[in-house]
């Protein structure tokens, strides 16, 4: 069994942003040499997300509006977590969007449907944060 | 290490439906011959879901109502994604329900609790769509 | 390839609670002897969750309030599932929080970011329930 590990670093210069990281994950898979296996890609921070959806700017605006409806950032005082922090909403938004994705590897490729793309979802930016890529297989 | 891959095809004749696919996934596992390992089952489309919950019709009606409350389909014009499409709500509903499940394989069986069943969640039907089953192990 | 399996049992004496199970999962990993691989940790019941977030009591109070807003327990009669049961809300809350986590194993450790902790989320307690830990790797 082969295994591979890489951290991807991000330093998003605003509070919230969605970034297509499929090219970086593809690069990891190429480096691993794994032909058949599973790839785990997860946020290493609990106010960020890794998820799979569509790379369409209208949808990304819909996500922003929708997440603000489900788990509004302000007023910060509505959350108990925000005594010392102001990012409780980011923990909740990440919960909706998910921590991780697991992707099949088949014949050395990410085994994706026609529109699947992997995104890093930042919900509390303005600092360096990491995503983990772990691959096991043969 | 063994690996196995199969696509399951669906062509749901309405916009939304939940279908118990546990028998098809069990069949995949039997075909794979894997005794100990992990099974990934994911929607290959970004307006559909694979999730684990209860096969109880009342609950499925509750899901329909609840998802319509969290991410209503109409009016279509409320979503930026719906310039050329009408399925933004399906992307959001799938986000709530999840893309994938990972299931343990133990002694050649899906290692499930008493009521766990795997469902395909269609949120934008009336066309052919796929689910991927990938198994690795020994 | 090595594989390891263990069930963790819980008997929470109230309807809802979040419990940090990272020490038990660490113990499983130590017992497995796996150095490089993947660890699956999932609720075996469909009214409970396993998720990764912050071990901070204010945030846990925020989760309680937020989940009650998204999927209120009462009135029980608002849910079709509650003909014979009273736990439809628990199925929905678990859907938001997720069934499972998959964690990378690197050099014999859970490959975590600085604040990641694994929680069991009970949403319909007062009975014995289980979490599954399955590890594969080398």
Image (cartoon, coloured by chain):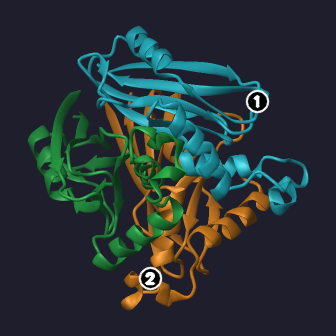
Chain colours: A orange, B cyan, C green
Residue at figure coordinates x 73%, y 51% from the top left: B89
Label placed on residue B14: 1
Query: In which quadrant of the rendered view does residue B106 lie?
Result: top left
Q: Is residue B38 left or right of residue B58?
A: left
Number of residues whose C-alpha sits closer than 10 Å to that of mark 2, classed few (under 14), some (14–19) or many (20 or more): many
Q: Is residue B128 left or right of residue C98?
A: right
Viewer-proximal residue, B51 or A43? B51
Q: Identify the element where label 2 is drawn.
A: loop
Q: Is residue B51 left or right of residue A12?
A: left
Label placed on residue A79: 2
Gap in angstroms between the C-alphas marked 1 and 2 = 40 Å
Res. A32 visible in picture: no
Number of residues whose C-alpha sits closer than 10 Å to that of mark 1, classed few (under 14), some (14–19) or many (20 or more): few
Chain letter of disc 1?
A: B
Chain letter of disc 2?
A: A
Judged from this view, the residue extending furthest toward the right is: B84
Q: Quadrant of the C terminus of chain A?
A: top left
**Residue A126 drawn at (x, y percent):** 53, 82
**Residue B27 drawn at (x, y percent):** 45, 12
Q: Is residue B20 left or right of residue A133?
A: right
């Amino acid at each position: 069994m082969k295994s591979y590990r890489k951290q991807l670093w991000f330093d998003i210069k605003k509070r919230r942003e969605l970034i297509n990281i499929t090219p970086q994950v593809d690069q990891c898979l190429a480096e691993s040499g794994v032909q058949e296996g599973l790839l785990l890609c997860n946020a290493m921070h609990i106010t960020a997300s890794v998820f799979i959806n569509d790379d369409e700017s209208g949808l990304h605006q819909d996500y922003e509006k929708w997440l603000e409806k489900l788990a509004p950032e302000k007023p910060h005082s509505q959350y108990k977590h925000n005594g010392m922090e102001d990012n409780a909403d980011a923990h909740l938004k990440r919960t909706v969007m998910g921590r991780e994705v697991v992707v099949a590897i088949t014949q050395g490729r990410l085994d994706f449907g026609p529109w699947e793309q992997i995104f890093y979802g930042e919900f509390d930016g303005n600092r360096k944060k990491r995503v983990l890529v772990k691959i096991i297989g043969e």
